[in-house]
Image: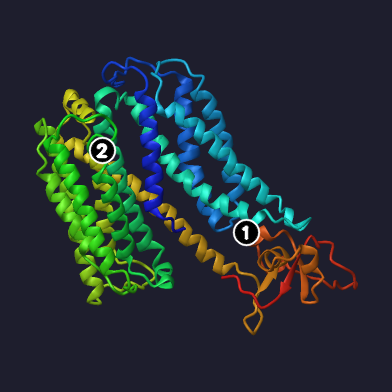
Amino acid sequence: MTVHIGGLLSLGAAALLSGARLASAHDHHGANLNLDPGEPIGGAMKMHIILMTVSFGILFPIGLVLGLKKHRWHVPVQATGGVLAIIGFVLGHAHGGRSFPENAHSKFSWFMLWLLAAQLGAGIYLKLHTERRFNDRARPFVKIAHKYLAALMVVATYTQVLLGVVAWLGFCYDGYMGQCLAHLIMGSSFLAYGIWLLLLVRLATPWLARFGRSPELYDSAMIMVWGLFNTFTEHGFIEEAHGWSHKDLQHTSLGVIWFCGGLLSTYMLRKAGPSDRSMFPAIILIFTGCAMASHEQDTEFSTKVHFVFGLSLVLAGFTRCVEILLITTGLIKSNSKEPNPFQYISVFFLCHSGMAFMSANHESVAAMENIGIDIGTFSLGYLSISFLLFFYAYFLMQLYTDLGSKEKDMMLPTADDGTVYQTVAQVSEIRGHSSDETARNPHVLFDAADDDDYDSPEMGSATFHNRNTPGGGISPRSSDEIELGPMRRD
């Protein structure tokens, strides 16, 4: 379940940048804030939003988790999501009601469609189990592609949702594009950083122990790379810049401190083990938060919004330092099955800081001021969104954990010596043999249904049938045999 967030962030940033260039290629005179409820969007567009939210926002992420656990509901969930996504795509390009200017969200949807087709196609190919009929040399590569396409789908979905909100509100046109992109990309990076830490806290302890690396090594490397990127993109990267403003100087200096601090921490942890920790990534967050909390803006409201963002970063860094202190002194057991509740605090504040920074772009703040919303209501609104996002990420990781627990309860029968029964399909895939060759193995003792059924809750000991039936013949359920071999399902 672990995914390299730094690499995915660069993909998401590239998608946002390319999408912004598509939007800027068209002439739009000023921001088009579509906040007037008098502009109906039409039933087709409403259904487009609902179907895409259900398919890409709910079904596909859950289907991804089910697929990682090879659960029997993986295919039905993904197939349902694919059907809803195709219907939503058609409705989105054939709707009536409000007229939206040509935008990056519409252009990027075609990439999403082809990505979805490739992902579903790879899944169907794998489900056909062609290795049972001939020597399928392409299957291992298709499995790898299917896994990485799923990871890419997560980032692409998030990017498309952001572009959809931008299109809905009419933000990021003309001279607002540069600062809008800066807030969306940097805010998304803090949000992804928080999700990455949640992944480490919830699921990645065995993974870190296996690789023998300090958790902060990955934080430090990600901070160093992102600081280098931020240093050279804050001034004149998207739009031609004339001189250096105080905002350009401050944003670029933040990139420099991220690179320098990340470089220091990465070097110090280059040979560190899982038990070796570092507070430097957290200290970088604290200094960044202090700088943003004192970041002067054009309006008082905008200054307060940046203060909330900076405060969230300071709290994230401070609680992270306290967490590391408690772990290194033994007050928190880092190798326990369930994380200490305090370990979630820094993760949440990082997620909230990302939402707060995305909300601090010029057009969003101006719109809130025009409506008459005060800073308290504004902050609580985005805090609620942060709670929902944190809940959904936690839910998916908890689902992964729960499915793992059930998987242990539903393992194949085990002999007294610890040997575990394996299906022919599983044995063939591991050994590189065909199913027919494996089936002729003298150690094949049992017949069973399709191997995917082993992940089914209904699977039990009664499902297994001895190859030699009472009548001395072969069981009619011989579509897939089970081998008693030296391999384990773990």
Relative to 132, is 412 on the left or the right?
Answer: left
Q: Nearer the viewer, mark 2 or mark 1?
A: 2
Compared with residue 122, is residue 97 higher up or lower down, i.e. above or below? above
Compared with residue 240, is residue 288 higher up or lower down, i.e. above or below? below
Q: Residue at x 76, y 63 (%)?
A: 434
- Residue 75: x percent and y percent? 61, 48
- Residue at the bottom extreme of this rendering: 417
Amino acid type at mark 1: Ser
Q: Nearer the viewer, residue 73 or 295?
A: 295
Relative to 470, is 165 on the left or the right?
Answer: left
The residue wearing badge 1 is: 456
Which secondary structure lies at badge 2? helix
Q: Residue at x 25, y 29 (%)?
A: 240
Q: CA distance from mark 2 to mark 1?
A: 45 Å
The residue wearing badge 2 is: 183
Q: Residue at x 59, y 51 (%)?
A: 73
- Residue 422: x percent and y percent? 68, 70
Q: CB under 8 Å between callouts 2 and 1? A: no
